[in-house]
Amino acid sequence: MKDFISIADIDRASMTGLFDLATELKRDRTGSNDLAGKTVGLLFHKPSLRTRVSFEVGVSELGGHPMYVTDAEIKMGQRESTYDIGKVLSRYVHGIMIRTFAHSNCTELAEAADVPVINGLTDLAHPCQVMGDILTCRERGKDLNSMVVAFVGDGNNVANSWVNAAGNMSFELRISGPSGYEPDEELLQAARAKGASVSVLHDPVEAVTGADVVYTDVWTSMGQENEKAERDTQFRPFQVNDELLSHASDDAIVLHCLPAHRGEEITDAVMDGTRSAVFDQAENRLHIQKAIMVELMGDR
Ligand code: CP
Ligand code: NVA
């Protein structure tokens, strides 16, 4: 693989290989020199805690040099074209991570760039997140071939990447949110054509009943702030709280990509409860992204 833009672009064997490599890198965080002498550009058009810090730390731990660049400098598409930016950056850096709005910014950059491009979140997808999430499920003893994952909330970029992952693996995915907030229809059809077991439900209890993993994310994603009041009303019945969680399997884990809006999509009791794996999940961003970078930019 040249780039890492979408989980739909890779297959089950590649996913498993990345989980295995991430687990190996996690055992010895600083023992690798895979990116020695290499610089990775980190382009941000949206805010970030986890993605920025985990990529910076990850590149450093692999012996490379991370370079954080915001759109205030680049002004992609305004100051110069995405194509030219991809070509120029390729003369300086060995890889590029981009967090941006339109998914096309990421794909156009990847087409232009002669070096690997990694999607660090677009409006459409958040593949590094869901790879780290599935790694967390595996660490918590879930059977990736048979687990039931209930995604409760918005059919957003994170939900879409879960749909993509379901196309490669045989777990059951149930997505539950209000009508009009479903995941991307094209991605759903593509995943189902590959054999994915994905249902889109409007009843959170039906989605969570017997689930092994209960997942939620913010109701209003970055860039949708002017819809917040309407979304708060629509999503209210989809809060992940103790009552909803009581319908899940006894050993269910709770995941949230973070940042969380405590008291909105998830309660404090659930987020801080014994079933919550959210901070392991945040840590695993580091390990899975190191594996992705080694695969794309390393010489193994
Ligand atoms: N989960 C995640 O991507 O967090 P940040 O937005 O803080 O990077
Ligand atoms: N869906 C959220 C995820 C943040 C990591 C957003 O796009 O804002």
Image: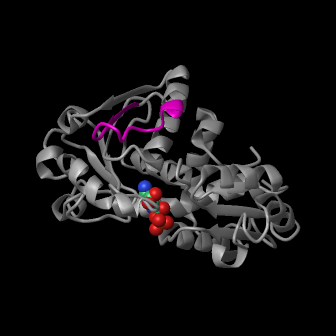
Which corner quadrant of the image does residue 26 belong to? bottom right
Which corner quadrant of the image does residue 174 belong to? top left
Instruction: Answer left or right for 226 relative to 97.
Output: left
Magenta span contains residue 175: yes
The residue shown at (82%, 67%) is 89
Decide which of 200, 15 is in the foreground and name it. 200
Q: Is residue 26 visible?
A: no
The residue shown at (65%, 38%) is 9
Q: Residue furthest bottom?
A: 73
Task: Find the magenta span and give its range.
Answer: 172-187
Instruction: Answer left or right for 152 relative to 170.
Output: left
**Image location (x, y in percent) of residue 212:** 29, 39
Which corner quadrant of the image does residue 53 belong to? bottom right
**Image location (x, y in percent) of residue 44:** 61, 69
The quadrant of the rendering that contains the N terminus is top right
Instruction: Answer left or right for 106 relative to 248.
Output: right
Above or below: residue 88 compared with residue 20: below
Q: Residue furthest right?
A: 91
**Image location (x, y in percent) of residue 295:** 71, 52
Above or below: residue 7 compared with residue 103: above
Decide which of 117, 229 is in the foreground and name it. 229
Decide which of 78, 8 is in the foreground and name it. 78
The residue shown at (16%, 53%) is 241
**Image location (x, y in percent) of residue 56:** 61, 73
Above or below: residue 31 compared with residue 169: below
Instruction: Answer left or right for 165 relative to 255.
Output: right
The residue shown at (69%, 74%) is 66
Magenta span contains residue 121: no
